[in-house]
Amino acid sequence: MTGGSVLQPGQLETAAGSIVELCLPAEDLFLRRSRRLQHLAKNHALENYLLFLTELTRWQHDELLSSTQLPPVDNHLLLQCKTHRLPPLAPAGWPRHASWRTAVQRAIAATDSSLPQEGKTALAPLRRGDTAWMERQADLLLHNPGEKSLDVAAALFIGAALQVHWAFWARSLIGLDLGFSGHSPHCPVCGSAPVSAIVHAGGASSGLRYLQCSLCSSQWHVVRAKCSQCENTKDIEYYGLEKMYEAVRIEMCPACRSSLKVVFQEKDAAVDAVADDIASLAVDEEMTKATEHTPISINFFML
């Protein structure tokens, strides 16, 4: 395992005001993720699971394109959130639309052929579609994913459906001034934790680190030489398995011991914050053996 490469304060920082602080999700986000998962699945130890996720994310792409029935974001809410610097799509203030539950059933149907029998059996509670149970599970996933009563099998499909809805709403904010001025440990659009970080290559954002939201898929800029949690700027460390995953590192802060997966477009232009996080699980396992750290991310497909 490669360890100990240190990024010092001031390295790769860009002049204030010269960068895009917030990148809202692209329309083909899930399609590109599906293609990436299919590519990563080849000869991978998790090949069957990655191929299943290929189907699920392809469903997400199709579902996003047909999500026009969702209600628009309230303009008054946007103004209030901008004034008070709050994320406008935080689940606590922007409630789920009831159609997410039927979207879950469509997701199950779309991936049924790629599910093993044990997977189909595990989804029995979700297939029954009990409204109160599903809403409770969604609450746990969004607000307390470490709770033991969270049904992990159900959470995967619930998370997939909610990601589509929140990506749709986040996309509806394109072109609006949300008042975000840089650095936040949580998504400035919906307040969720990141799934991982991505260092861009090419264009005005080349070399800059963006955290990607686990729920709405927005990306927000956080300076690379700074811990996203405690804002420490000294001796940030990177760990990785270069021979296996050249484009993936885990960033760790020596002050608070928080850690976050980082993927680098300069190493592979097709990297995806969700797909590469799953495919590089071996890096997480090796880092856990090497040092104590606390991951601050959440991946709905890897709970």
Image (cartoon, helix red, strand yellow):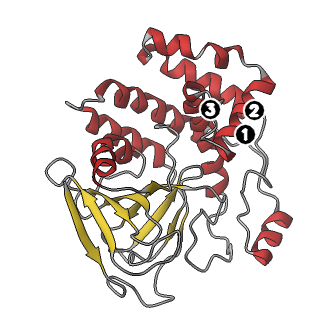
**In the picture, residue 104 is in which quadrant?**
top right
Q: Earlier in the sequence, mark 3 or mark 2?
A: 2
Pick the residue in front: 94 or 24: 94
Q: Distance between the residues labelled 1 and 2?
A: 5 Å
Residue contact at pointers 1 and 2, CB within 8 angstroms: yes
Q: Residues within 10 Å of mark 3 (few under 14, many from 20)?
A: few
**SS at mark 2 in the image:** helix
Q: Which residue is drawn at 60% across and 62% down?
A: 187
Pointer 3 residue: 148
Question: Is 290 on the left-hand or right-hand side of 228?
Answer: left
x then y, percent, for residue 150: 63, 31
Pointer 2 residue: 136
x then y, percent, for residue 262: 36, 59
Q: Nearer the viewer, mark 3 or mark 2?
A: 3
168 is higher (above) or lower (below) than 250: above
**In the picture, residue 199 is in which quadrant?**
bottom left
Pointer 1 residue: 139
